Image (tube, rainbow, N blue to C red):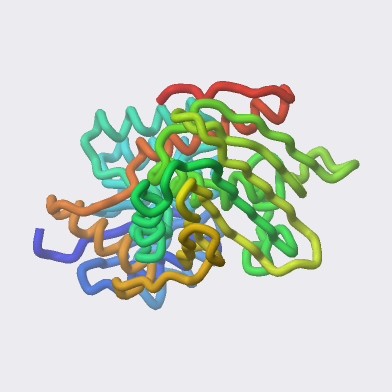
Amino acid sequence: MTRPVRVGVIGLGAIGQSLLKALTADPDVQVAAVCDVQGALAEATAQPLAASAWSDHRRMLAGVDLDLVYVAVPPRYHHAVALDVIAAGRHILCEKPLALTLNEAQDLHRAAQAAGVVHALNLPLHRDPGIETFRRLAQEEHLGTLRRGELTLVFPQWPRAWQHNPWIGGREQGGPIREVGPHLLHVILATLGPVGRVWAHTEYPAGDPAACETAAFGTLELAGGPLVTVSCLTNLPRPEQVSFTLYGSAGTAGLVNWAQPVAAAGEAPLEPVSVDAPRVPAGTRLVQALVRRVRGEPADLVDFSMGVRIQALLDAWERSSDAGTWVDVTPT
């Protein structure tokens, strides 16, 4: 394929609009169609792109010749919309989490494999140079034997100021564990390997059964034995903090501010670690990799199999929080 990759976008909220910028900036991409249940929003988005506007994604899939479709609808609709995209034979990029339940995520993975389409998940930390540097620091020659991991999530308000929408603050689809968690769970799984079981405790606001968590604490037991603690707090007077620290017998390695690597040898204080590779914007990296894969070339993407593994952890977290006990992570 030498012509531009023709892309359709379903869902034009804050996240969909963000990646749309990277799609339109790539000379190898033509955004040919956009779709949102708010027809006026679809029309306004489509006009400067010379794209067609739709309010029904099925009609868009039937009416436009597309190579790749980006599904950026709320999580409740991932399963149904993504299945329609796959059934139409289109390559697919889906927002995280892959689905609302583990069964739905597994269903999507099976369908994409059977259809033979490229399937990818939008996880912006993937291939970030800071994350890659951290993963090298997490190796045994730097860290020694892993003793413990600590993941800390602090948000002064939830939903965050840029992300207010009808579902992000709801218990069914939103909340920081489901919304932010997949980014760091991907880092944990890719760096440390499988998680065998989970213990979790979740706090919800009194008197509002539909609201998402305000705090959570839990423990992930790695298949090899070490533990990773997870602490999440929202709505308190502190700056946002997203950090991950690994304590080893010979040193410490970590991430601060999402993707800035830090490290220490022995008892030395943690210091920032320089990142050698240039930092290309996450959306640009993702779009370039998608173009290569759609054209049949090799490229490193997070596919639906990782989406299923992340969903299995989220599922175990919720089951543990409900039961108040350790629960095994369902094998995937």
Choose between 115 and 261: the one closer to the eye. Answer: 261
- At horizontal 40% and vertical 27% (from top left) the residue drawn is 107
Q: Position of residue 71 (x, y in %)?
A: 42, 50
Q: Is residue 206 found left or right of 233 in the rendered image?
A: right
- Give me the residue at 47% from left, 54% from top: 251
Rendered view: 176 above or below 229: below
Q: Say which quadrant the N terminus sits in.
A: bottom left
**Residue sitting nearer the eye, 25 or 154:** 154
Residue 245 coordinates in the image, percent (x, y): 54, 54
Point 34% across, 47% down: residue? 302
Q: Left or right: where does residue 318 sit relative to residue 64?
A: right
Q: Is residue 206 visible?
A: yes
- Seen from this angle, which residue lies furthest right? 207
Q: Which residue appears at 31% of the width and 75% of the height? A: 278
Q: Is residue 280 visible?
A: no
Is 216 on the left-hand or right-hand side of 30?
right
In which image quadrant can residue 289 be found? bottom left
Q: Is residue 170 above or below residue 110?
A: below
In this view, which residue lies farthest toward the bottom? Answer: 48
Observer-nearest of 120 and 268: 268
Q: How many marks?
A: 0
Residue pushed farthest left?
A: 2
Whole-percent x, y for residue 110 in the image: 33, 28
User: Relative to 116, does residue 54 appear above or below in the rendering?
Assistant: below
x and y, in percent, of residue 169 in the image: 71, 51
Q: In which quadrant is the C terminus drawn?
A: top left
Examine the image and state in which quarter residue 86 appears: top left
